[in-house]
Amino acid sequence: MSMLTEQGPSNRKEIIYYERDRLQAVRVGDWKAHFIVQNHGWSGPKEELNAPLLFNLRRDPYERAAEESGMYINWMGKKMWAFGPAQAAVKQHLETFKEWPPLTFEPEAVDVSGIGR
């Protein structure tokens, strides 16, 4: 709230990214881990990854290192510790589902037969 009222920076340290009901990524501070990628923009196909991609957004704000760096796998291997905070953030987020279960929305279940009559 302090950021919205211009009284200081955001208190948020984690951001959870969803597309509908699918967890796509988690950001903790400058670190972001992707579980699903969409390399060709919002209209492109989604690819579920066997292992998450890791990015340091301060050093790689456009998240290109995995594609453009020949040393990405070596770098990521040295930064595996960053998955710990990401895992903890996802676990904490999933714990909230006990008190506030997620809503599910199935477009196929919506009856639109009466629209336009």
Image (cartoon, rainbow, N blue to C red):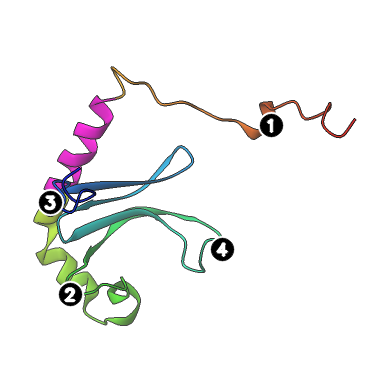
Q: Residue furthest top?
A: 99
Residue under the image location 21 percent in, 79 percent down: 71
Residue 108 has which mark? Answer: 1
| Disc 1 to disc 2: CB gap under 8 Å | no
Q: Amino acid at mark 4?
A: Gly
Sequence-earlier tag: 4 or 1: 4
Q: Position of residue 47 (x, y in %)?
A: 47, 56
Q: Is residue 87 magenta?
A: yes
Q: Label 4, on which residue?
A: 44
Disc 2: CA contacts within 10 A as few (<14), some (14-19) or many (>=20): few
Q: Amino acid at mark 2?
A: Arg
Sequence-earlier tag: 4 or 3: 3
Instruction: Name the foreground residue: 95 vs 79.
Output: 95
Q: Cα distance, mark 4 to mark 3?
A: 39 Å
Q: Label 3, on which residue?
A: 7
Residue 54 higher or lower than 19, as above or below: below
Residue 58 higher or lower than 33, as above or below: below
Sequence-earlier tag: 2 or 3: 3
Q: Is residue 108 left or right of residue 21?
A: right
Q: Is residue 41 left or right of residue 26?
A: right
Q: Cα distance, mark 2 to mark 4?
A: 26 Å
